[in-house]
Image (cartoon, helix red, strand yellow):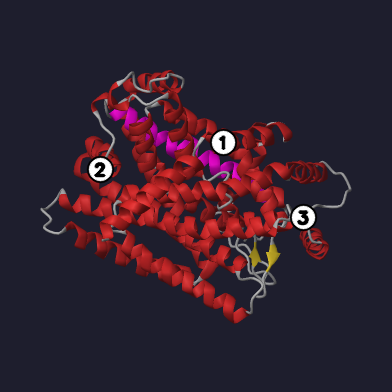
Amino acid sequence: MLEKIISVIEKVNNTLNGIVWGWPVIILILGTGILLTIRTRGLQITRFGASLNSTIVPTLKALGKKKKQDSRLQSVSQFEAFATAISGTVGTGNIVGVVSAILTGGPGAVFWMWISAFFGMVTNYSENVLGLYYRKKDREGNLSGGAFYYISYGLKRKWLGYLAAIFCVFAAIGMSGVQTNKISGTLTEAVSRVSALENPSVIKFAVGAVVAVITAVVIIGGIKRIGKVASMLVPFMSLLFIVMAVIAIVIHIRNVPTAFSMIFSHAFNFKAAGGGILGYSFSQVIKKGMARGVFSNEAGLGSSVIAHSASETREPVMQGLWGVFEVFFDSFIICTLTAFMFLTSFDIKTLTPGEDSVMSMNMFSSNFGKFGTGIFSVILPLFAFTTVIAWSYYGEKAVEFCFGRFSDKVRKSAVMIFKMVYVVLIAISSTIHSDLIWAIDDTFNGLMAVPNLICLIALSSLVVKITKNYFDRKKGAEIEPMLSAYPEINEEFKEDIESAE
């Protein structure tokens, strides 16, 4: 009976996924990025220096220094908001997802990941600008924002905002399933390489249960605890991965030119790997690259903006610049290192699509032996866990938005029910077939992206206006700041900035 239900779900999802990730949505993603790039005059290039100088550079300089936060607002620091957002993007998609894209779409898929990321930088910037501009304070004084806010109050399409929020809830549940499934699969595979396992599913469920408990402890503390946990784990896990990947690439440095050649030669070939098992069509290469690119950096989904909207900053553009760096770091650093580590370590012509998690582990073990297996067994679970806690917050805020018109009791009950379901499904999803979970989440990611992208196009002129307002003020122009769409909040934020100066 269960097998029949799963079979029906697979068929329905495959049909829906083919529509969601068909050419119309691919064109919409690229088209939105291109439009925003043109309208902002290539902001991801012209303002990239400003992005670094106003985000990661001052953050590194301020390490170890305590900064007093405004007690009037239930917010988090800019870096904690960024860390929460980046923890939602830097997940298994950066390792397993990249390997999967190469195995199923050929090396050319990496090129289309880069294309997705280049335009995604300005897409994510625009999401953050609109997210902070249209964010609101809830009854507890928390700053809340996201795609559903600027769709509802900017585009003025409440029904579409609610639809985006519903898609976000399902995408959050799906994302947690993907990440937990990879955690349990990775740790089970690592244990099996040391000793024989009689019942792997028991181990997987035990791992899922532990992840569920830890997740529950973290998410009960809300955005502040999530932000603090993410701000501690993200730098550590990212640095560990970068060091290991660079060492592996240096070991095979002679293969780097070949890897570059494969990426560019297969990006535009109508046969991704010259026929054979990897001989996918040109459209398949683009779709795999774009789908995995969006899955990884989330630009266009309207998800990471939910975390950014909780930032203490009053300037939408300031947090927008964090979005530029976020996509750059996620795709051009982490995903690229994964791609080159994989392409330089193996002859992909001898590989077949399938166990991408196992191949990802082999990528480490082939370079570093048992030590590499152990490191991978630490890195991937950390990547996955931070994504799980970030998406729990995204789903929570989406539920709050849907029940915003109800009483506090009803709204809080709805959020609590979501958290309970979220935690329970974490344990359950640890034993489900990973391909199905990944496919379902791909579908909801696409559904979540469509209303968000439509809104970004419709409000692109506002993004340009807010951006110009900020940089004109930076040059000394005495003009009214565009900090919020709501006059009372705009005035309050204006006073905060003036008092800080």
Residue neighbourhood size for the residue with mark 1, other residues' Cα within 10 Å, grouped as few (<14), some (14–19), many (≥20):
few
Residue 383, image x, y percentages: 40, 51
Q: Is residue 25 left or right of residue 73?
A: left
Q: Is residue 164 left or right of residue 343?
A: right
Question: Residue 278, how many percent across, how many down?
Answer: 32, 27
Badge 1 element: helix
| Residue 388 in view | yes
Res 382 visible: no
Front in this rendered view, residue 128 or 355? 355
N-terminal of the two: label 3 or label 2? 2
**Quarter of the C terminus within the rendering:** bottom right
Horizontal and vertical percent position of residue 226: 50, 64
What residue is shown with label 1? 24
Which numbered disc flags the more N-terminal residue, 1 or 3? 1
* Type of amino acid under label 1: Pro
Which residue, given by chain and number where applicable, does mark 2 sit on? 358
Kindly identify which residue carries mark 3.
483
